[in-house]
Amino acid sequence: MSTRRSAKTTAPPQLPLANPWLAILAAWLLPGGGHFFLGRRGRGGFFFVLVLACLAIGVALGGHLPWQFEGSPLFILASIGTLGGGLPAIAVKLSGYVGDPTGAGLEYGRAFIITSGLMNWMLVLDTWDIAWGKELEAEDSGGAEEQSDGGEA
Amino acid sequence: MNHLLLMALYAAIVGLFFAVVARRARRAQIVLFLQIFLGLVLGGIALGWLMFFFPAGPPTPG
């Protein structure tokens, strides 16, 4: 363990694969955009479909779209989560969507909408790691089972 | 609106997401997906049953 740690500290500084700031901007603006920007097109397309499907299900259920950046801390946190959805979430908000306040899907839909934003925040972080070449470390950390085939989703 | 179906759908989306984000090998992705999916669905059902032990609120009048 100690040798591994010392090896890490003596390693030369890593250069990014691409501009990390542009990559995370692309990742935030469009779900999967960061992965696409970094050449991970298969995964980028997958995340694009998955995050947008999550947002679409939330809207179809008539869920509440949290967009309140003052007042109750919980609402602010939910709004920051939703904001993670980037352009699609902003587009839904700007379209005048308010959800269905009396509908049974208000809470369920809100869970889907916030989750889509939170997933995209995680994609932003994942994009940052990939841009700095940390993707291989993630592969290594999964154990021998993962190393047997390195197929890309 | 089928609540159980929505819960399963939510669990499937979250499971798929984390499986692809956190694992690279296909077999490891399937294992993690099943862990998250079953954990969320079965955990949700278990929590639902546990809520029977808690009062649902004040009794309705009349």
Image (cartoon, rainbow, N blue to C red):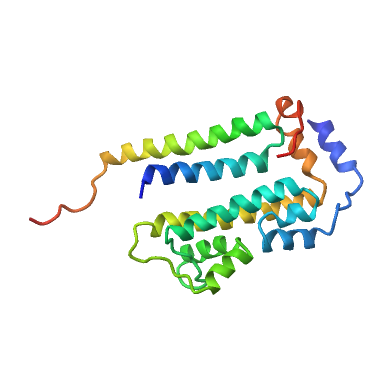
Q: Residue at x 78, y 43 (%)?
A: A135
Q: Residue at x 34, y 40 (%)?
A: B48
- Which quadrant would the C terminus of chain A be assigned to in this image? top right
Please identify the residue farthest to the left as the structure is shown.
B62
Please identify the residue farthest to the right as the structure is shown.
A12
Q: Using the rendered view, name the quadrant where residue A90 is placed.
A: bottom right
Residue B60 x %, y %: 14, 54
Q: Quick check: A33 above or below A6?
A: below
Left or right of A15: which side holds B54?
left
Closer to the camera in the image, A76 or B44: B44
Q: Quick check: A50 above or below B25?
A: below
- Which quadrant would the N terminus of chain A be assigned to in this image? top right
Q: Quick check: A61 above or below A92?
A: above
Q: Which residue is drawn at 66% across and 28% down?
A: B27
Q: Which residue is drawn at 75% across and 34% down?
A: A151
Q: Using the rendered view, name the quadrant where residue B43 is placed.
A: top left
Residue A78 x %, y %: 50, 61
Closer to the camera in the image, A10 or A96: A96
Residue B30 x %, y %: 61, 32
Left or right of A111: which side holds A4?
right
Left or right of A38: which side holds A32?
left
Q: Say how many tags the image has.
A: 0
Left or right of B37: which side holds B46?
left
